Image (cartoon, grey):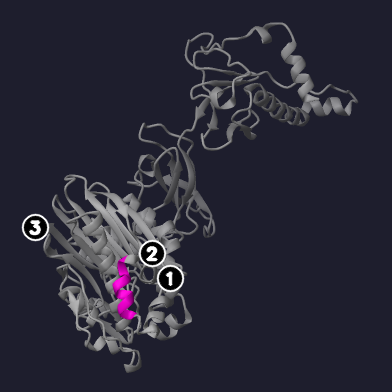
C-alpha cells in the first residue's frame, strides 16, 4: 500500500513535484542550516551500499541497497521507513490517543517527501544508480528534515580498552578503522569522578559522580597516575584520516578501575639507557621470549615450573601491562619476540607498539596458538618482503635443502623427530627510509626446547641459515643479517658453535645428544660471519630449576658492529622474588638489547 501511495504522491501536481532545486539558505540570516548526517558506505568490491541516518524521533535507520539499483527505489524505501516512524510517533501523541478514545478514525499518514539533491542543489534523477547517486556532500531531504550525505567517512570498526589498568603503566586502546587510520584519530580520555557525600549523610558507597576530562588525556596512549587508582577511565575516539576528515565518535569505558602498580620493575633501570630513539645509522635491536600465555596458565606452570610466582602475576592481563611498558621503554628500531600468543599480537602488543611507531609482523607456529613477531620502526624502515617458513616443511620439500636431506637419509628416526617439531623461521627484508641502498635481513626463530634435543637444534639451525643465505645472496645480494631468537642453546652447545663459527664437525658430541642409537655423523657449514651482539651473558633464562644463556642477537660481522649493549638487570633484581617470572618481571626470559651501527 505504501508503494502505491508513494507513486500517487509523486504523480501529484503542485509545488512538491515542481521542486527541482534545494534552497540551502535560511530565511533571514543567510547562514547554512544545521544538518544531521546521512552516512553512506559504498565499497566498489561489494554489491551493496548502506545508508544510515537518525529520524527526528531519535530512531536510527540503516538500509542496505544494491549499488546498481535505481535511486528512486531506494528513496521509496526511505519514505516507507520514515513513514512508519512518523506513524508510531503519532500513535504515542496525546491528541492521537484522545481521538482514538473518542472513536475517531483517522487515515494513516502519507509517507514524507524524500529527495536527494546533488552538491549544486539539483535533484538527482531517480534512474541514476545508487553507487553514482549517493555522492559526498549531497543532501537527503526527508519531509522537512535535511541530511548531509557523508560517503565513506572515517569509521571505527573496533574500539577496546584493556581489562587490567595499572597506575604508571600505559593504557593502549585497540583501534581499528575503515576509510581512516588510528594515527589520524582524535582521542580524549576521561576519569571517573567520585561524587562527594552530602553533609551528614552516610558513606557514599559505590555511586559515581560522572566523568571529568583527564589531565594530559588527548593522546592515543594514556598513562594513569596514582591519583587515578580506584577510578575507571573512559575514552572518546573520533575516527579520522590524513585529510583531516572525521567520522562519528564512539566512547568506551573501562570494565574496572585503575589499580596500584607493582612498584619497581626489573626493566626500570634499563630504560635509563633507552629514553630516546637512536639516531641515523644506528639500529636498536631487541630479542625477547615473552612467555606465551598458553604455557603460563597451566597447572604445571603454577605448581612445578613457577611455584614461587604469585598466581595473579601469571595472569595474561597483568603480564601484558608489564610487557607493554617494558617494550615501549626500550625505544627500539627492531624487536624480535618469541612465544607470542596470536591473540596477544592482535589485541594487545600489536596495537600498543603501533601507537609508538612500530609495525608488526606475525608468524604462527604450525598447529600451535603461539608464534613469532617482528616489529620495526616505520620512520626508519619499510618492508620490502617476507620469507617465512616452517623449518620441518622446508627441510622436507624445499630444493634448497636437498643436500641436507641426503645427509640425513641414513637417520630416519632423527628425520622423524625434526618433522614432529613445529618451529618456524620468520624472515623480513627491510629497507632504510633515509638511504635506499641500505637493506637489512631480520630473521627470528625459536628452536626446539628439549635438553636432549641438541641434534635436532643443529638441523633446525642449518635449515634456517640455508634459507637466510638464499634470501641474502640470491634474492637480495650482499644484504647483511640480524638473526635473533630463543635458540635454547647455551654458549657451550653445538648450535651456538655452529652459528658463530660457521661449521660443525660430524663428531661433535651434540650429534649424540639423544643417545648413541640416534647419533648421526653429519658435518654442516654456512657462509656467514656471525657474532653474538650481546656476548654471552651468564643467563637470559632464570627459573627455579635452571638458569643459562639461551637467547642471542647474532649480527653480520662484515657489515654491522655493536655500538652499545644495554646492561641486563642485576642478579639482585632478578632474584628479588626468587626467580622469573615475578610480580615485577613478565617472563621467564630476559630481553637482550643492543645498538648496532653500519660499518
Q: Mark 2 points at which residue?
A: 320
Q: Is residue 110 above or below residue 288?
A: above
The image quarter in which residue 224 lies: bottom left
Q: In this view, does 269 lie above or below 52?
A: below
Q: What stretch is highlighted in magenta?
A: 400-408
Coordinates of residue 549 in the picture (x, y in percent):
23, 78
Q: Quadrant of the C terminus?
A: bottom left
Q: Is 581 colored magenta in this rendering?
A: no
The outermost residue toward the right is: 103
Marker disc for residue 293: 1
The image quarter in which residue 52 lies: top right
Q: Name the residue under label 3.
A: 599
Mark 3 touching mark 2, by CB under 8 A? Answer: no
Could one spot residue 331 in this view of the protein? no
Query: Residue at coordinates 32% horizontally, 46% vertically from top-left?
Result: 216
The image quarter in which residue 407 lies: bottom left
10 Å neighbourhood of mark 3: few (<14), some, or many (≥20)? few
243 on left or right of 559: right
Could one spot residue 544 in this view of the protein? yes
User: Could you tell me how far apart the alpha carbons at marks 1 and 3 are, in whole angstroms?
Assistant: 40 Å
Query: Residue at coordinates 20% horizontally, 77% vertically from top-left?
Result: 498
Amino acid at each position: 500500500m505504501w508503494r502505491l501511495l508513494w507513486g500517487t504522491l509523486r504523480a501529484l501536481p503542485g509545488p512538491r513535484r515542481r521542486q527541482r532545486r534545494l534552497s540551502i539558505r535560511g530565511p533571514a540570516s543567510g547562514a547554512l542550516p544545521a544538518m544531521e548526517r546521512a552516512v553512506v558506505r559504498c565499497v566498489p568490491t561489494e554489491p551493496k551500499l548502506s545508508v544510515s541516518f537518525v529520524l527526528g524521533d531519535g530512531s536510527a535507520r540503516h538500509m542496505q541497497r544494491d549499488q546498481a539499483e535505481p535511486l528512486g527505489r531506494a528513496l521509496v524505501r526511505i519514505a516507507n521507513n520514515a513513514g512508519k516512524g512518523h506513524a508510531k510517533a503519532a500513535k504515542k501523541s496525546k491528541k492521537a490517543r484522545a481521538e482514538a478514545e473518542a472513536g475517531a478514525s483517522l487515515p494513516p499518514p502519507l509517507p514524507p517527501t524524500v529527495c536527494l539533491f546533488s552538491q549544486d542543489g539539483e535533484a538527482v534523477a531517480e534512474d541514476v544508480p545508487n553507487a553514482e547517486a549517493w555522492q559526498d556532500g549531497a543532501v537527503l531531504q526527508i519531509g522537512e528534515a535535511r541530511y548531509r550525505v557523508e560517503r565513506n567517512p572515517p569509521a571505527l570498526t573496533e574500539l577496546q580498552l584493556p581489562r587490567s589498568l595499572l597506575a604508571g603503566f600505559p593504557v593502549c586502546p585497540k583501534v581499528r578503522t575503515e576509510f581512516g587510520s588510528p594515527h589520524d584519530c582524535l582521542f580524549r580520555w576521561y576519569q571517573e569522578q567520585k561524587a562527594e557525600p552530602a553533609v551528614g549523610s552516610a558513606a557514599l558507597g559505590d555511586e559515581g559522580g560522572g566523568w571529568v576530562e583527564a589531565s594530559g588525556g588527548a593522546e592515543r596512549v594514556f598513562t594513569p597516575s596514582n591519583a587515578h587508582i580506584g577510578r575507571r577511565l573512559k575514552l572518546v575516539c573520533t575516527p579520522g584520516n590524513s585529510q583531516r576528515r572525521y567520522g562519528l565518535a564512539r566512547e568506551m569505558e573501562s570494565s574496572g578501575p585503575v589499580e596500584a602498580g607493582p612498584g619497581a620493575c626489573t626493566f626500570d633501570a634499563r630504560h635509563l639507557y633507552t629514553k630516546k630513539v637512536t639516531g641515523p645509522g644506528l639500529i636498536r635491536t631487541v630479542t625477547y621470549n615473552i612467555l606465551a600465555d598458553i604455557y603460563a596458565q597451566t597447572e604445571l606452570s603454577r605448581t612445578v615450573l613457577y611455584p614461587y610466582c604469585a598466581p595473579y602475576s601469571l595472569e595474561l592481563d597483568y603480564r601484558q601491562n608489564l610487557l607493554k611498558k617494558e617494550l615501549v621503554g626500550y625505544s627500539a628500531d627492531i624487536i624480535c619476540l618469541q612465544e607470542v600468543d596470536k591473540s596477544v599480537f592482535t589485541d594487545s602488543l600489536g596495537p600498543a607498539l603501533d601507537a609508538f611507531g612500530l609495525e608488526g609482523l606475525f608468524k604462527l607456529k604450525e598447529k600451535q596458538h603461539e608464534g613469532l613477531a617482528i616489529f620495526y620502526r616505520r620512520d626508519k624502515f619499510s618492508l620490502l618482503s617476507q620469507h617465512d617458513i616452517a623449518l620441518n616443511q622446508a627441510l622436507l620439500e624445499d630444493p634448497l635443502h636437498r643436500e641436507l636431506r641426503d645427509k640425513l637419509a641414513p637417520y630416519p628416526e632423527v628425520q622423524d623427530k625434526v618433522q614432529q617439531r613445529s618451529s618456524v623461521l620468520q624472515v623480513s627484508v627491510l629497507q632504510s627510509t633515509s638511504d635506499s641502498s641500505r637493506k637489512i635481513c631480520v630473521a627470528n626463530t625459536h628452536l626446539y626446547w628439549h635438553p636432549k634435543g641438541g641434534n635436532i637444534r643443529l638441523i633446525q639451525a642449518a635449515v634456517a641459515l640455508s634459507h637466510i643465505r638464499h634470501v641474502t645472496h640470491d634474492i637480495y645480494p650482499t644484504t647483511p643479517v640480524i638473526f635473533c631468537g630463543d635458540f635454547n642453546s647455551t654458549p657451550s652447545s653445538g648450535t651456538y658453535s655452529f652459528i658463530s663459527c660457521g661449521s660443525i664437525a660430524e663428531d661433535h658430541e651434540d650429534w649424540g645428544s639423544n643417545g648413541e642409537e640416534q647419533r648421526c655423523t653429519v658435518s654442516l657449514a654456512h657462509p656467514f660471519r656471525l657474532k653474538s651482539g650481546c656476548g654471552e651473558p651468564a643467563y637470559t633464562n632464570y627459573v627455579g630449576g635452571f638458569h643459562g644463556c639461551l637467547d642471542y642477537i647474532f649480527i653480520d660481522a662484515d657489515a654491522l658492529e655493536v655500538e652499545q649493549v644495554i646492561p641486563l638487570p642485576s642478579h639482585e633484581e632478578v632474584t628479588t622474588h626468587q626467580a622469573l617470572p615475578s610480580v615485577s618481571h613478565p617472563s621467564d626470559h630476559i630481553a637482550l638489547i643492543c645498538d648496532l651501527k653500519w660499518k
